[in-house]
Image: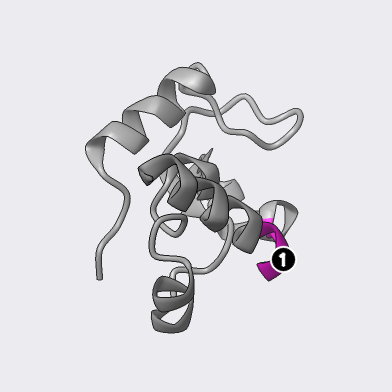
Amino acid sequence: MITFSNKVKQDILEAQNGMCRVLNCYEPIHSIHHKLPNTKVNRKLYPNFIDSVFNAVGLCFSCHTNNTHLFRISEKEARVYENYLKELKG
């Protein structure tokens, strides 16, 4: 399954100064997490959004294991981002 591009990964690393996004966690980013799960259904419904920087958050190993629920977004939010990205593509 497709994952985030190197560009998205780099953008997240830069935006978060290489540090985990969880409040009061000062560990370096270990992986980039999808806020909306990377499923076949979501990939079909939100093709522009699913692997975009808007659906990405950098987390350390521990927080990726224990705190991903903090960054979940609703399908309604995903739809707004998807529509925005479609408009940008023209």
Q: Residue at x 34, y 36 (%)?
A: 9
Residue 64 on the magenta span: no
Q: Residue at x 61, y 60 (%)?
A: 78
What amino acid is found at the position of numbered circle 1 in the picture?
Lys
Q: How are the colours assigned in the image? A: one colour
Q: Nearer the viewer, residue 16 or 50?
A: 50
Q: Horizontal and vertical percent for residue 5?
A: 26, 44
Residue occupied by mark 1: 76
Q: Nearer the viewer, residue 85 or 10?
A: 85
Q: Nearer the viewer, residue 24 or 21?
A: 21
* Quadrant where the N terminus is found in the figure: bottom left
Q: How many marks?
A: 1
Q: Horizontal and vertical percent for residue 6?
A: 24, 37
Asked whether residue 42 appears in the rendered view, the answer is yes
Whether 58 is drawn above or below 15: the answer is below
Residue 3 shown left or right of residue 23 in the figure = left
Q: Secondary structure at mark 1?
A: helix
Span of residues in magenta = 72-77
Q: Residue furthest bottom?
A: 41
* Quadrant where the C terminus is found in the figure: top left
Q: Residue at x 39, y 81 (%)?
A: 40
Whether 46 is drawn above or below 24: the answer is below
Q: Horizontal and vertical percent for residue 80?
A: 65, 55
Asked whether residue 74 appears in the rendered view, the answer is no
Asked which quadrant contains residue 27, the reply is top right
Whether 58 is drawn above or below 74: the answer is above
Q: Residue at x 51, y 40 (%)?
A: 60
Q: Horizontal and vertical percent for residue 37?
A: 52, 68
Q: Nearer the viewer, residue 79 or 29?
A: 79
Mark 1 neighbour class, 10 Å CA radius: few under 14, some 14 to 19, many 20 or more: few
